[in-house]
Structure formats: C-alpha cells, structure tokens
C-alpha cells in the first residue's frame, strides 16, 4: 500500500480512512515499539526490505596450528550457517469516539501512537519469550526463548541466593562457549536484588541500576512476563534476531461489530460501533523473529 501523498497536518481523518500511517507518525510508533520492547532492547536487529530474509552467521571460527620452521602450516576455514526469518503480520483494533474523525490525521496518530505501540510490543514480547499466541514456527526457528533454554537444559532453580543463581546461569551459557550479554526480567526482580546482601549485610547489587553482574538489564511488565514460568532470562542476545518491515497500515470502520470485545455495560454483547456512535481503528505491521541458538539462553526457574 502506497504512502499517503497528502499533508497529514492539513487533512481531516474522516477524508482518509485507510492507507499507511503518515511517515513521521509511523516512524515515531516504530521508535516507541523498539524503545519499549524488552526483546528489541537486547536482541539483534536485522534490517528487512522484504517479508523473508536470509542471513548467514558464524557457526565455527578458524583454527591456528603450532609449526616448526619450514613446516607447512595447516589451514582451516570458518564455518557459516544460513538462516531465514519471515515477518508475520500483527494487528490491533482500537475502538474510539467519533469525535476523533474531526481531527487532522497528524494530530490523531500522535494521540493514538502510544496505544498502537504498546499493543504491538507487548504481543511481540509475549510471543518471543513464552510463545503466547505466537505466529512463528515454535518448533524450529521461531522457538520461544524460555522453552528453547529449557529444552537445552539451561535451567537454574531459584535458591534464594541471587549471586549464586546468576553465576550458575552464566555458567550454563559459557559452557556452550558463548558469552551472556543481557538479562530480561520484571521490575519485581528488584526486590531480589535489594535482598541480596553480603556477610556484612551490604547490598550486592544496585537495585536502581540498569545492569547486574556487569550485564544490561531489560525490564518488561508482569502482564508480559509469566513469573510462574521464569524469574529471569539470561542470554547471548546476538543469537536472537528480529526485523521490522517499514510501514504501518491502517483502516477505519464506522459500522463494524467488534465480536472479540464485549460492552462494558450490563448487556455483555459485542460492541456495535454504529449503535454507540464510535469507530474502530485497525492497524497492522509485520515483525520477524528468529531464535538462532536456543542454547544461548538460560532461565531462572521459580521454586515450586
């Protein structure tokens, strides 16, 4: 779908009910998504210009050999593996008051930008971390990170000794000849950080900081991260890839019935936009994800 040729600040939304969100506002939404997605803060971004992308990564490096003078030096070559990831469509429908149809396109999309971004980054993080409603191939390249870590045996059960537990998580990844470079968790994890004390009752960690044991921390909400399944996820995040296709498409409907949304009043019926003098904004975009090496991740499991 083509980018709109109108000037968003000069046209009324009701005159342009479908198309691509104007470039300025679309870019801001993309930035909002990338700034707030816990996965995107840590994982490696693969620029995408098509729905599928093939890329190569170093699977095994070269070797060096000891030789005596005049002896022929052996040679080895690096081993590269090829992977392909595919962008999947994600969408959100937001019911709104018809008053917004009188706004300019620019003002309207500036207003709903946080709603669109939040819906997208939360759904993406849930799919990648735990496989919640995942559109990706969860048995192969789109395997959820926690599930992949569990299948590889990279699991540490919480002992209530945070320093020891984190060290054990690091060791499981280092045993794979990989280097952990980030930890994903929830803000409630800060409580464990505050309660981790040395022999003199001094804190081992800065609970207000943005790293732990030298690794960057990325926080996500409790509505995204299931603490009953994992307390924290550590990894070499170079082996989690994502890609975003530019352009967020939208469409507006004034007469649809939203069958997946029930009215907040006593009727409990699907919401009829016509009856309630509302309209619905549908926004869609495409995001790709690949778990290149499940063994690059380790999960801290809560005690049962």
Image: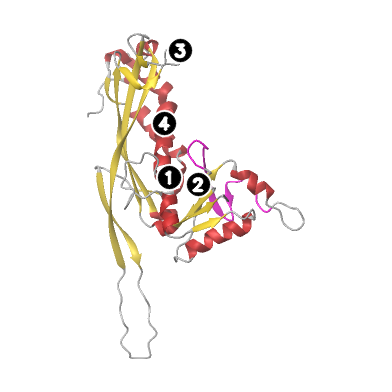
What residue is at 67 percent from the left and 47 percent from the top? 194
Relative to 114, say whether 291 is above or below. below
Mark 3 or 4: in front is 3
Residue 55 x %, y %: 28, 54
Question: Which residue, given by chain and number where applicable, does mark 4 sit on?
Answer: 119
Separation (CA) of disc 1 from disc 2: 9 Å
Find numbered disc 2 in the image and state the secondary structure of the residue it sits on: loop
Question: Which residue, given by chain and number where applicable, does mark 3 sit on?
Answer: 266
Find out whether the residues at labels 3 and 4 contact each other: C-beta distance under 8 Å: no
Query: Does label 4 or label 2 sit earlier along the sequence?
Result: 4
Find out whether the residues at labels 4 and 1 contact each other: C-beta distance under 8 Å: no
Relative to 174, say whether 283 is above or below. above
Find numbered disc 4 in the image and state the secondary structure of the residue it sits on: helix
> In terms of depth relative to the viewer, which is nearer, 140 or 23?
140
Circle 4 residues within 10 Å: few <14, some 14–19, many ≥20: some
Separation (CA) of disc 4 from disc 1: 17 Å
Q: Is residue 265 left or right of residue 156?
A: left
Question: Which residue, given by chain and number where applicable, does mark 1 sit on?
Answer: 130
Residue 82 x %, y %: 27, 58
Mark 3 or 2: in front is 3
Which span is picked out in magenta? 204-226
The dot on residue 229 is 2
Circle 2 residues within 10 Å: few <14, some 14–19, many ≥20: some
Query: Does label 1 or label 2 sit earlier along the sequence?
Result: 1
């Amino acid at each position: 779908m083509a980018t709109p040729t109108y000037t968003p600040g000069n046209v009324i939304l009701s005159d342009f009910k479908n198309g691509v969100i104007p470039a300025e506002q679309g870019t801001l939404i993309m930035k909002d998504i990338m700034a707030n997605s816990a996965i995107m803060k840590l994982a490696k971004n693969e620029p995408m210009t098509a729905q599928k992308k093939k890329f190569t990564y170093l699977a095994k490096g070269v070797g060096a050999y000891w030789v005596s003078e005049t002896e022929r030096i052996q040679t080895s070559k690096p081993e590269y593996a090829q992977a392909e990831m595919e962008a999947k469509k994600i969408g959100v429908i937001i019911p709104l008051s018809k008053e917004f149809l009188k706004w300019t396109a620019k003002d309207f999309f500036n207003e709903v930008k946080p709603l669109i971004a939040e819906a997208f980054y939360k759904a993406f993080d849930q799919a990648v971390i735990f496989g919640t409603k995942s559109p990706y191939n969860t048995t192969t390249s789109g395997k959820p990170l926690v599930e992949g870590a569990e299948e590889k045996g990279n699991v540490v059960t919480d002992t209530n000794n945070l320093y020891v537990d984190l060290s054990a998580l690091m060791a499981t990844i280092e045993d794979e000849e990989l280097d952990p470079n980030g930890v994903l968790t929830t803000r409630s994890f800060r409580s464990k950080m505050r309660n981790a004390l040395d022999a003199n009752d001094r804190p081992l960690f800065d609970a207000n900081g943005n790293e732990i044991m030298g690794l960057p921390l990325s926080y996500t909400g409790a509505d995204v991260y299931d603490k009953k399944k994992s307390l924290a996820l550590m990894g070499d995040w170079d082996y989690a890839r994502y890609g975003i296709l530019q352009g967020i498409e939208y469409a507006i409907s004034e007469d649809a019935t939203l069958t997946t949304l029930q009215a907040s009043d006593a009727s409990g019926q699907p919401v009829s936009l016509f009856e309630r003098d509302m309209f619905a904004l549908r926004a869609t975009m495409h995001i790709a994800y690949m778990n290149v090496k499940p063994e690059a991740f380790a999960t801290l499991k809560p005690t049962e």
